[in-house]
Image (spheres, grey):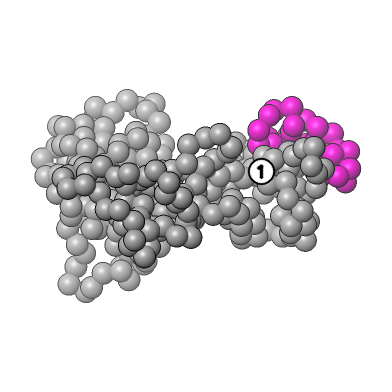
Amino acid sequence: MRPESRIPSQHPLRLIRAVADEALTALNEQFAALYSENGRPSIPPEQLLRALLLQAFYSIRSERQLMEQLNYNLLFRWFVGLSVDDPVWVPTVFSKNRDRLLAGDIAAAFMDAVLNLPRVKALLSDEHFSVDGTLIRAWASMKSFRRKDGSDEPPTPGRNGERNFRKDKRSNETHASRTDPEARLARKSDGQEVRLAYTGHLLMENRNGLLVDARLTQATGIAEREAAAKMLAERPGNGRITAGFDKAYDTAEFVAALRVMNLTPHVAQNITAHRGSNIDARTTRHAGYRISRKRGGVAVLPLTV
């Protein structure tokens, strides 16, 4: 029995598999440069990248659970490229091979290869984009957030010892996580919980809502605007574009930087009692801006703007 015989002809993973295989073919030379002449490691990079796609599509939270699914799920076996009798990899081996690919920037090259395929490129807008950011919770406990000079009270003995945080003013300048030093205390907005986190950034094109760039940075107060400017600066093409943002991006420095980049900033106006918005009539007078604001949140711009 072949796993493919059990997959419905109209299943969406069939089209995704065809696109992924086409992009992976273009990366053969980069795969070869990563490994010695004695052969590739135990997991072919093509199969590993397909497995990572499944982990993202189906929100599988760990490599161990992914390997468990691959052991009995015929759909997953077919998509990755395993036969019914092929053994499944050891989770730790899978993780080490994955880290090796990420260190070699293969994941980013794979995304670029997908976006440059003719069938995908035809779906992408090169004129209208949206940018947004979100906090990604770090895999670190608040108990690990200790003073950098080691002067605070240690946790009580035990696997999950208690800590007394009373009168302990914690900040990113004076404290750091012992288990994840790069994580930072952050919150998405006023009134929300402060947690150890990173900031994720997405650049979407607005014709079909497809992701064209993604980045992860430390959670600083200006990380969203810095990452947005870098992603838009590295976009393909040099023509004038429009980009939508929520009101967190309404700062004088950011708006000025976008205008220098030949970009019309469709930023939601952040008008408060203390200051006015940095988005003026040069943008708000256009019908396209008014339409984008009606959608709420990040602008979704019509193609006729």
Left or right: 66 as drawn, with respect to 226: left
In front here: 184 or 262?
184
Q: Is residue 216 visible?
A: no
Residue 69 locus on image (x, y percent): 21, 35
- Quarter of the figure with residue 232: bottom right
Q: Residue at image x 66%, y 43%?
A: 248
Q: Residue at image x 40%, y 31%?
A: 12
Location of the C terminus (image quadrant): top right
In front here: 165 or 76?
165
Q: Is residue 187 visible?
A: yes
Residue type beneath disc 1: Ala
How many marks are shown on the rendered structure? Answer: 1
Q: Residues within 10 Å of mark 1 (few under 14, many from 20)?
A: some
In front here: 3 or 161?
161
Q: Is residue 260 magenta?
A: no
Left or right: 142 as drawn, with respect to 268: left
Depicted 293 relative to depicted 131: above or below? above
Magenta extent: 279-305
Q: Which residue reaches farthest bottom?
A: 37
Q: Residue at image x 17%, y 72%?
A: 38
Left or right: 111 as drawn, with respect to 49: right
Depicted 98 relative to depicted 289: above or below? below
- Quarter of the figure with residue 2: top left
Which residue corresponds to mark 1? 248
Query: What element does badge 1 sit on?
Result: helix
Left or right: 174 as drawn, with respect to 75: right
Depicted 9 relative to depicted 22: above or below? above
Residue 77 locus on image (x, y percent): 22, 38
Residue 64 locus on image (x, y percent): 20, 42
- Quarter of the figure with residue 222: bottom right
Residue 96 locus on image (x, y percent): 23, 58
Q: Is residue 295 magenta?
A: yes
